Amino acid sequence: MTSLTDRKNAAISRGVGMTTQIYADRAENAEIWDKEGNRYIDFASGIAVVNTGHRHPKVIEAVKAQLDRFTHTCHQVVPYENYVHLAERLNALAPGNFAKKTIFVTTGAEAVENAVKIARAATGRQAIIAFGGGFHGRTFMGMALTGKVVPYKLGFGAMPADVFHAPFPIELHGVSVEQSMAALKKLFAADVDPARVAAIIIEPVQGEGGFYPAPTSFMKALREICDQHGILLIADEVQTGFARTGKLFAMEHHDVAPDLLTMAKSLAGGFPLAAVTGRAEVMDAPGPGGLGGTYGGNPIGIAAAHAVLDVIEEEKLCERANQLGNRLKQRLAAIREKAPEIADIRGPGFMNAVEFNDVKTNLPSADFANKVRLIALEKGLILLTCGVHGNVIRFLAPITTEDEVFAEALDVLEASILEARG
């Protein structure tokens, strides 16, 4: 009998990489069962998509109710009220004390693409500045903005023009806020006139790049330099949004309002939905028909997103994220006393990471991080690695994870790190 892995290899492009060989059969909150009946604790959440857990009852109820009414009309052809209402809610919730407007699309990469389109239309400029280690999607503009070559840009030819990169400040790797700002100013002097720059795009906490939080002083400096030169600031909150960092949006940690904010992933609790929210006058720059898409703002995703926002508020998930994140970081700090490979423990709220170095060379150790991941998987805990050097494990468990399941996962994590040492 042909295995599922063999069938996958024969039927699906190898470009679709797979972190595990687990084939899901069912899932509930923070747990997944595979086709063989094996149980796993999910500390990946579909890469930060189910912050409210797999199949949250309120989300499922909202989706079922929408299914009984209609599933698709295309909002640009026959609009619907819950699309308008969700836009109103996001306009009110996004940081910034100014009038806002929203558009809905389907994926995070699509949100980023549209944010760039909007920025260019609003400013009449072309250039975009992003940061090393940043991740913004796998479309061509997404790849161009992404600050990592392998595997995202490898073999795909020339990237879109007028995209520039500056170093992201990471003290652990010897890059200070002052050095990043100096590099940005050097970019303006040597490569691109700031009067040609439409936008600077930044993740408040780098996702794929290693879960490095942007320092508040850096975010404020970016806001100042954008204001000075008429540049728009785009916050890519695709991974950081919806209570993951202990705030609804990570930009709230800095008291800095972006001009445009992209969101996706956990917006709809497992259903495809993404959005761009921004200053009303900026969002109105493209003409009618310049924005949109056949599936953008699908009514099923919209219904799910309303339920997600309700759950975050009713279950106080921002507070819960801080509680779980503190417990995780405290446990990792205790493990660090027995595992000197741990070079750093970080992250706001429940967007946490542990970074591993080789104890002999003090250089990043992707091998150790991957070994921990594989041992944990054997013990029933799904983990994800990330980082430019591949030496970081990121933790993205549902914020709704039950206390007993969370405690079990921490025990598995500790056992896996210690076993990897041996």
Image (cartoon, rainbow, N blue to C red):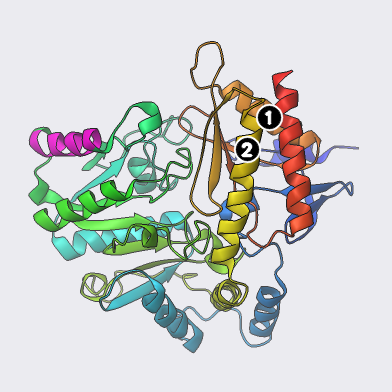
Q: Quadrant of the C terminus?
A: top right
Quick check: is 244 in the magenta stretch? no
Prevailing SS of the magenta stretch: helix
Asked if the residues shown at circle 1 and circle 2 are in contact, with their CB atoms under 8 angstroms apart, the answer is no
- How many numbered discs, if any? 2
- Whole-percent x, y for residue 12 in the image: 66, 41
Q: Residue 383's x, y, as percent?
A: 66, 41
Rate crowding at label 1 as few (under 14), some (14 to 19) or many (20 or more) other CA atoms within 10 Å: many
Depicted 41 relative to depicted 189: above or below: below
Q: Counting other residues with Cα less than 10 Å from the Cα at mark 2, is it few (<14), some (14-19), or many (20 or more)? A: many
Residue at horizontal 26%, vertical 64%?
A: 259
Instruction: Tell me where residue 2 sits by quadrant.
Output: top right
Give me the C-alpha separation between circle 1 and circle 2: 13 Å
Q: Is residue 77 visible?
A: no
Q: What amino acid is found at the position of numbered circle 1 in the picture?
A: Val
- Res. 372 mark: 1
Q: Which residue is tagged 2?
A: 332
Q: Which residues are magenta?
A: 178-189
Q: Secondary structure at mark 2?
A: helix
